[in-house]
């Protein structure tokens, strides 16, 4: 068999695999979304709701959560966390250990504020979706992140 035949076979197998995978995903009751949608911005905060929540919040709303002693999770790498973070925030560590740490402090039904470095960082949304999959029901993504929080001179701390 020559090289062209191998390439053709690989392309056929790959094409069949992709079509089959998309078909199976489409038919599943809990299919995986192929394109993620932007999170909605919270207009108001209702901490007492029993409905699951996954929304973005403004800096004013984040400060309100902070003043109500909500738990903050820093989605950035440890190096950035150590240089400075929202006072009292938990750092992003091995995911199962993070879940254990959260559950030692509060239930899965209490609010969690997840943040990253700046509005362009997607790590906070990724972490929020992972936490949602793990059963946490009140998740708020502070898109302004560390950059906006520190610029406002709100409570912070560092480990260095």
Image (cartoon, grey):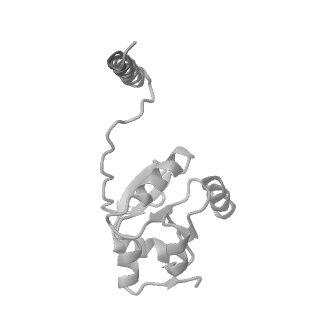
Q: Is residue 121 visible?
A: yes
Res 25 quadrant in image: top left
Residue 85's x, y, as percent?
A: 50, 77
Residue 84's x, y, as percent?
A: 50, 80
- Outermost residue, bottom direction? 153
Using the image as rendered, state which of residue 75 and residue 104 is in the foreground. Answer: 75
If the image is split into quadrants, where does the C terminus sit?
bottom right
- At a point 59% along the width and 82% down the height, the residue shown is 159
Residue 91's x, y, as percent?
A: 57, 68
- Outermost residue, front direction? 2
- At a point 38% along the width and 58% down the height, the residue shown is 122
Using the image as rendered, state which of residue 20 and residue 104 is in the foreground. Answer: 20
Q: Is residue 102 left or right of residue 87?
A: right
Q: Is residue 140 left or right of residue 131?
A: left
- At a point 44% along the width and 66% down the height, the residue shown is 115
Using the image as rendered, state which of residue 99 and residue 118 is in the foreground. Answer: 118
Question: Compared with residue 112, is residue 15 higher up or lower down, i.e. above or below?
Answer: above
Q: Is residue 97 left or right of residue 71?
A: right
Question: Compared with residue 160, is residue 73 higher up or lower down, i.e. above or below?
Answer: above
- Outermost residue, top direction? 1
Q: Is residue 72 visible?
A: no
Q: Is residue 67 left or right of residue 91?
A: left
- At a point 55% along the width and 59% down the height, the residue shown is 110
Res 20 quadrant in image: top left
Residue 70's x, y, as percent?
A: 53, 69
Using the image as rendered, state which of residue 67 and residue 73 is in the foreground. Answer: 73
């Amino acid at each position: 068999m020559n090289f062209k035949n191998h390439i053709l076979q690989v392309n056929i197998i790959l094409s069949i695999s992709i079509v089959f995978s998309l078909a199976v995903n489409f038919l599943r009751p809990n299919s995986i979304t192929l394109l993620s949608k932007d999170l909605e911005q919270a207009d108001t905060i209702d901490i007492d709701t029993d409905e699951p929540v996954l929304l973005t919040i403004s800096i004013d709303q984040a400060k309100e959560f902070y003043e109500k002693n909500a738990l903050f999770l820093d989605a950035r790498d440890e190096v950035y966390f150590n240089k400075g973070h929202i006072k009292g925030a938990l750092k992003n560590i091995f995911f199962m250990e993070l879940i254990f740490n959260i559950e030692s402090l509060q239930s899965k039904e209490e609010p969690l504020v997840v943040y990253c470095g700046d509005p362009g960082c997607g790590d906070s949304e990724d972490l929020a979706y992972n936490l949602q999959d793990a059963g946490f029901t009140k998740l708020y993504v502070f898109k302004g992140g560390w950059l906006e929080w520190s610029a406002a001179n709100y409570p912070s701390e560092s480990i260095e």
